[in-house]
Each structure stands twice: as C-alpha cells, then as structure tokens.
Image: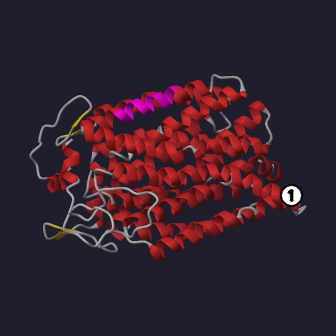
C-alpha cells in the first residue's frame, strides 16, 4: 500500500486543471467520458491513434480467404506473413520506448503512424506472396504506438489511477483488432454486391479506408496532443546532470523486472495477437462458416477488449490499494493462469457454439492479464519508463512470434485445435516467473518490503 500512498498526494493548491492532480500535476482521478485538457484529451488521442494502428494491422486476416485465392498463397506463406507482422513490431517497440524518453510520446507516436500509413495503402498493390509478406512485416511496425500510448498515460496519471488509465487506453485501442474483423468483410461485400466490382479489385479498394484513418489520427495527435500535464516534452534534469539516450537505455535494460514483465506479457498479449491472426480462419476451416460469420466471431474476441483490459487495470489498482504491490502481482498471476486454462479448453471443444463460448471467456481473461501487466510497469523505473514500456511491449510481440512460429506457421505437425491447447499450456508455464519479481520498497508475491524508508523519487531513479 506504500506504493499508492507515495504517488497519489493531491495538490490542492493547483487551479490550472479541471480534475484533481498530485504534486507532479498528474491526474488522481480518471474520467473516461471527459475531454478535459490535458489529461483526458491525451487519453482519447492515445487510444484512438492506437485503435487505428490495430485496425490497419489486422485488416488483412478477415479477408485472408479472398486474398489467398487471388494471390495463390500457400498455408506456409500465410503463416510466414503472420510471423513477419509481429517481427516488425518487436524492433519498433524496442525503439519506441527510448524514443518516447527522448522526444516525447506525441511526436514519436504521430511520426510512426504517418510513416506506416502509406504501407497500409500499398496493400492494394501487392501481387505475390513475397510482397504480401513484406507488407505485413512493415505494417506491423505501427503496433509500436502501443508503447507510446502506455508511456503517455503513465506521464499523465498518478500511481493511484495509472493502471486504470493504461487499461482503458489499451483496451479501447485493442478493440480495433475486433472492429476490423467485422468492418473489412462488410466493406469488401459492399463493393462486390452493391457496386458489382470484381472480387480481386474489391479487396484492394477496401484498404484505402484503414490507411486514411491511420493518417488522420496521427495528425490529430500532433495538433491537439500534449506530452505532459505542464506542456510538451523536455528531457528532465536530475541531480544537475542531463541524461542521454544511452544512460536511459542502459538503466532500463539492466532492470530484471522489465525482462520478466516482457516474458509474462509475451504470453498474454502475444497470445492475443496470435489469436487475432488465426481465429477467423480457424472457425472458417473447422466449422465451415462463411467469411462474414467467421469475421463476426473473430470480431467478438477483439471487441471484448472494450471491457476486459480496463477491468484488468481496475483490478490492479484496487488490489494495489488494498494489498500493495503483492496484490498487483498475485492478481496478474491468477488471471493469466486462468486464461491459459481457458485456451487449453478452447482447443478441446468440438462444437461451434461451445467454442464461441469458451473463446469469449478466454478473451476476457487473457486481455485482463494484459491490463494487469501494465498496472505494474509504471512502478518499475521512473527514470527509464519508456525503455521498460518498450521491453514489455516488445515481449508481447515476441511471444506472438514464438507461438505463431512454433504452432501456426503452416509447417507444424499439429492440428490448429491442438496447437491452441499447447499455446494455453505455454501461457501457464511462462506466467510462473512473475513470482520472482521483487521491489525492495514494496515487496513481492511472497516477501514483504526490505526498505520502506527510501525517498520515492530516488527509489524510482535508482531501481
């Protein structure tokens, strides 16, 4: 509970903000339906920008059956492209953390979105398996905006509510992966049925929409966004010494907690990304539903983020207030382990409606686990928050690469349903290292704090 008390002291003397803030002018309350500047405006810009990136990245899977026939793609081509989309995100997320530390989340986020929007548009021009794989690889870079989003929320919201803000921002943004599963087939069908445009042209035209959407949100971030409660980003000075890029990076990389959270996140968010990639084709192939129905079922998995990931953030904050860091850690372990069990069960059920029901439960737990993870991240290192966020976020996409490569690459000897169950077992196993996370000031899952008297600011800078 020390962690919450030390970061949520309200500054009653400040009259410059429409909501309660602490002495760093970070918001101590969260009002998701407010547009008050700068805190809640930053929240809405962050989730909307990331929403567009998820929409773009997962615009291809719901149209995969059409694209596969047009480009004569093999199952190996499709699996390789899915892996490529995540590999691109690994490197960009690692770079995005330090970029936020140096340039601020607003410029870093908008720049990446503007650079990748033309790649989304170029999807309409692909004509071979190689170009298909290349486009998926490059579009995947846009998912690094997740790191910028979480960094931005941690810069705007105090410790007592940062888990909630992170959960809502990421949760509402991740809904983009579900909305695109629903919208892209409808856009494609509109062109083929209402305008009688041939199928091989219709799916190409459909990709104009996500490209424009992503560029528009980037411009909104640049024009209306603000990096910090008191203005745009400038690197802070600590002990009269400026921190350069290398020192910030090294300080984050040597923090073992960041590596463990990256591993844990790889088998909650990483599994979620893999599921977004394969779930529509899974229902299409196994239960022989049409492309619209497969897209609608897959959409429900992503749309659950609207509720489930914010709930993870709420649980993290509530447990943190009641039990301190121990509550946050135990909640993450428990929720992610249950998610693994639900994933195992998803591969075992044999009827469509039972599969949909289990998938819905699985989505709630796996997405809540992601929210719980980023309820812990802001407490790891204040000095290298961007690096820790980048390490954790990259772990998510690295986990997606591992699960996609080992289980869904097209060359595996397992059936898709068996691979889904194995993925669930991997989740359970790779959640266990969270038991090793320990904070001297706040303790861990099994041990209490060893140094409760250290100054909070110095603690964040040194650990």
Q: Nearer the viewer, residue 399 or 39?
A: 39
- Local SS, label 1: helix
Q: Is residue 443 left or right of residue 358?
A: left
Residue at the limit of the structure toward the left, as seen here: 453
- Check residue 338 for magenta coloring: yes
User: Where is mark 1, residue-wise?
Assistant: 192
Position in image of residue 95 (x %, y %):
42, 60
- Residue 140 seen in this snapshot: yes
Position in image of residue 318 (x %, y %):
32, 41
Position in image of residue 134 (x %, y %):
64, 57
Can you say whether 360 is above or below 32 in the image? above
Q: Residue at x 81, y 55 (%)?
A: 189
Q: Quadrant of residue 135?
A: bottom right
Q: Residue at x 63, y 22 (%)?
A: 348
What segment carries the magenta color?
Answer: 331-341
Q: Is residue 41 left or right of residue 239?
A: right
- Residue 422 seen in this snapshot: no
Position in image of residue 445 (x %, y %):
27, 31
- The quarter in which the N terminus is drawn is top left
Q: Is residue 57 left or right of residue 43?
A: right
Q: How many marks?
A: 1
Can you say whether 15 is above or below 321 in the image? below
Q: Quadrant of residue 225?
A: bottom left
Q: Quadrant of residue 278?
A: top right
Q: Nearer the viewer, residue 139 or 155?
A: 155
Q: Nearer the viewer, residue 359 or 8?
A: 8
- Check residue 29 for magenta coloring: no
Mark 1, Cα crowd under 10 Å, few <14 / some 14-19 / many 20+, is some
Q: Is residue 256 left or right of residue 340?
A: left
Q: Residue at x 23, y 64 (%)?
A: 24
**Main secondary structure type of the part rendered in magenta:** helix
């Amino acid at each position: 509970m020390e962690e919450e008390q030390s970061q949520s002291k309200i500054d009653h003397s400040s009259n410059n903000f429409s909501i309660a803030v602490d002495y760093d002018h970070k918001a101590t309350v969260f009002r998701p339906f407010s547009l008050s500047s700068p805190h809640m405006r930053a929240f809405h810009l962050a989730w909307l920008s990331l929403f567009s990136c998820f929409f773009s990245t997962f615009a291809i899977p719901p149209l995969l059956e059409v694209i596969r026939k047009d480009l004569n793609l093999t199952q190996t081509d499709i699996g390789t492209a899915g892996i490529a989309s995540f590999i691109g995100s690994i490197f960009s997320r690692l770079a995005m953390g330090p970029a936020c530390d140096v340039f601020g989340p607003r410029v870093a986020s908008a720049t990446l979105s503007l650079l990748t929007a033309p790649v989304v548009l170029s999807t309409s021009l692909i004509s071979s398996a190689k170009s298909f794989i290349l486009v998926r690889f490059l579009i995947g870079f846009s998912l690094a905006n997740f790191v910028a989003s979480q960094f931005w929320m941690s810069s705007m919201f105090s410790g007592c509510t940062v888990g909630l803000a992170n959960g809502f921002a990421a949760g509402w943004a991740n809904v983009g992966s579900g909305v695109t599963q629903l919208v892209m087939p409808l856009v494609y069908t509109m062109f083929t049925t209402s305008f009688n445009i041939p199928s091989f042209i219709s799916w190409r035209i459909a990709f104009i929409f996500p490209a424009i959407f992503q560029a528009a949100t980037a411009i909104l971030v640049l024009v209306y966004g603000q990096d910090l409660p008191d203005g745009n980003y400038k690197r802070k000075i600590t002990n009269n010494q400026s921190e350069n890029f290398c020192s910030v990076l090294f300080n984050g990389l040597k923090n073992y907690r960041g590596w463990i959270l990256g591993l844990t996140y790889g088998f909650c968010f990483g599994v979620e990304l893999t599921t977004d990639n394969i779930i529509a084709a899974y229902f299409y192939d196994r239960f022989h539903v049409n492309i619209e129905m497969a897209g609608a079922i897959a959409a429900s998995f992503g749309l659950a983020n609207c509720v489930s990931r914010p709930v993870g953030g709420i649980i993290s904050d509530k447990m943190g207030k009641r039990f301190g860091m121990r509550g946050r850690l135990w909640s993450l372990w428990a929720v992610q382990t249950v998610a693994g069990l639900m994933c195992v069960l998803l591969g075992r059920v044999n009827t469509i409606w039972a599969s949909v029901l289990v998938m819905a439960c699985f989505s709630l737990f796996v997405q809540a686990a992601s929210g719980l993870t980023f309820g812990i991240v802001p407490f790891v290192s204040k000095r290298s928050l961007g690096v820790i966020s980048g390490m954790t976020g990259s772990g998510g996409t690295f986990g997606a690469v591992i699960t996609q490569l080992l289980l869904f690459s097209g060359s595996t000897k397992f059936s898709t349903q068996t691979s889904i169950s194995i993925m669930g077992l991997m989740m359970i196993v790779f959640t266990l290292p969270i038991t090793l996370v320990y904070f001297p000031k706040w303790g861990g899952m099994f041990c209490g704090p060893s140094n409760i008297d250290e100054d909070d600011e110095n603690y964040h800078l040194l650990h």
